[in-house]
Image (cartoon, coloured by chain):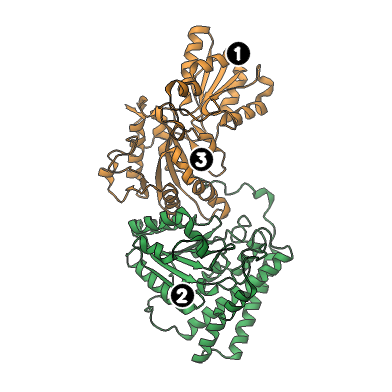
Amino acid sequence: MKSPTTAGAKPEQELGAEQLGMFLYQMMLMRRFEEKAGEMYTRGKVRGFLHLYTGQEACAVGAINALEEQDKVVTHYRDHGHALARGVDPNRIMAELFGRQDGVSGGRGGSMHLYDVEKGFLGGYAIVTAHLPLAVGLGLASQMKKQNAVIMCVFGDGSVGEGEFHEALNLSVLWKTPVVFFCENNLYGMGVPFHESLSTEIPKLAAAYNMPAVSVDGMDVLAVHRATRIAVDHCRAGNGPYFVEAMTYRYRGHSMADPELYRLKDEIEQYRKRDAIEKLKAYMAERGDLDEAKLAELGERVEHVVEQAVDFAEQSPNPPISTLMDHLYKETAGG
Amino acid sequence: MAEMRMRDALREAMREEMLRDPDIFLMGEDIGAYGGSYAVTKGLLEEFGEERVRDTPIAESGIVGAGIGAAMGGMHPMVEMMTINFSFLALDQIVNSAAKLHHMSNGQISVPLVIRMASGGGSQLAATHSHSLEGLYAHFPGLKVVCPSNPADAKGLLKRAFRDQNTVIFIEHTANYSVKGEVPDDPDFLVEFGQANILREGSDVTIVGYSGSVHQAMRAATMLQEQEDLSAEVIDLRTLRPLDMETVINSVKKTNRCVIVEDDWKFGGFAGELSAQVMEQAFDYLDAPVARVSCKDVPLPYNRNLEFAALPSEEDVVEAVLAML
């Protein structure tokens, strides 16, 4: 899966049929991949914590496709969607969920800790907000080494109460590091509504640190993409960080273990009516970029890729016990 | 060779390494214009400029995290924690990010980072500012823990830390900053990790120390010689991870007795680990149980008499040796 290129085009320019098709494909892939991951969890193939991204697809697709090849992504533990959007091999993501040797993290990380350095995907982070200071440091390295790389730092609304959120935003503005702080506000920090755990609105926090901040409809991939393109351009031009809040919603529980006692089924139904995939389909159909045949073809492709990922994961061996102590320390030349 | 204090040897190490490697930069609270709380980084801002010597906000977790990120991005940062006491605020970043990313990413990511911090009691700074946590950091696989006791080791070990591809927790006992010693001026002078140093050879008892406690051990050895005609071998561990048990075990096989001195609390402290390893590897050679001389199990009080009663002294070491004869 190659990343669609929107680099060079102005953010306000309309996307072409090919790019829209890629967005739709990626979102459908995420939806199906997560359904399958959930199924594999209930069958005991995937263990540990599993946090599904279902419902939030427009965020990852809109934001991560605003990046160029040299850019980097760090994200939270609900990370499958971001890895897929960045072009990480679905086979190796599924194998990681299975804990197998061919997983992106060799079976050492699991669902919450996916890494693919070659793709500039520097990880899912399972301690809430821990990756925000890391993003500032990555931005600093890009700046000091003159790499012109922008760091896309994805986190949830649950992050904003942590001290590190404020430390990272402040440092990033002081040092003008090229970081897009991309907040996926899915309305709940686990089961607590965000307005019960925050005394203000999220973009105001960024504004308080003199960082430009916008809030967009996270159920609209084109709106997310437009906003993050502006953000990425701002960072790349050397103007320092930029904050984007995307208002979104997760259809599934916080994790597979969530009994969802804190919200009503009706609320989920209301959001499903605004589904981002359906919205993009309707937009493309209206433009004449999508018909039944093309949609069926996309569906088959997605099905094939996900089935193949499960087969790949099933066939990949467990990492040998003899490798248990590998990668504890990186070898240092001369000692 | 030149005689200098430990703080100057540390500064020389950073200076030389920064001249050697343009990816090295420093950041921390008041390390620039102020020159560092213990004057270790004094003059480096003037020499290397604001890009490479960065004053930071007081935000330990944020700056350690930024150091980790910069290291992941190909730089080799040094973050100064001012004192080890404040490193609690950055503990999650050190333990969950720095120590684990290489392993958890299956070797894809590495975190070449030096985190320096001043440690130790004895300066009447009271309970929140007097910790000795070398053993705490040594607990975590994935970290390297270095704690020099003298200027030459401080320079050689810090230079070695900047040539490591992993995170090195570099702990400096405040009582050692003004200790003077001969320091090699060869820019490639390095002290390897995992090599304990026999500071004094002896045959009746092995006294093991690290960081500040090496000095109590040495004074105790002199007292034992002069007052009791006993010959003590003194070992400075220099690094706790990697740990050179071979030197300790070989010594215990010779002396048949072992006393461990540390400023840390006895309960759950590093001496417990050392003691267990001596028991596991040299049980048949021991003529007496291994003794631990540690800090009393209490937060360090401000009052001078109380503080000194809590900290291990050379008299405590002598007493422990005499009790095992």
Q: Secondary structure beneath disc 1?
A: helix
Q: Kindly indicate the quadrant of the structure image that contains residue B18.
A: top left
Q: Is residue B204 visible?
A: no
Q: Chain of mark 3?
A: B
Q: Secondary structure beneath disc 3?
A: strand
Q: CA distance from mark 2 to mark 3?
A: 43 Å
Q: Is residue A235 visible?
A: yes
- Kind of residue at disc 2: Val
Residue topped by disc 1: B323
Of residue A290 and residue B309, the one placed in the foreground of this image is B309
Of residue A105 and residue B266, the one placed in the foreground of this image is B266
Mark 1 closeness class: few <14, some 14–19, many ≥20 residues within 10 Å: few
Residue plotted at (39% across, 82% down): A13
Q: Position of residue B111 (x, y in %)?
A: 48, 50
Residue plotted at (63% across, 57% down): A107
The N terminus of chain A, quarter of image: bottom right
Residue plotted at (43% across, 69% down): A244
**Pointer 3 and pointer 1 on the same chain:** yes
Q: Position of residue B45 (x, y in %)?
A: 28, 44
Residue topped by disc 3: B144
- Kind of residue at disc 1: Ala
Residue topped by disc 2: A224
Q: Are marks 1 and 2 in contact (CB under 8 Å)?
A: no
Q: Position of residue B222 (x, y in %)?
A: 47, 13
- Kind of residue at disc 3: Lys
**Pointer 1 and pointer 2 on the same chain:** no
Q: Chain of mark 1?
A: B
Of tags 3 and 1, which is closer to the observer?
1
Give the drawing colour for chain B. Answer: orange
Give the drawing colour for chain A. Answer: green
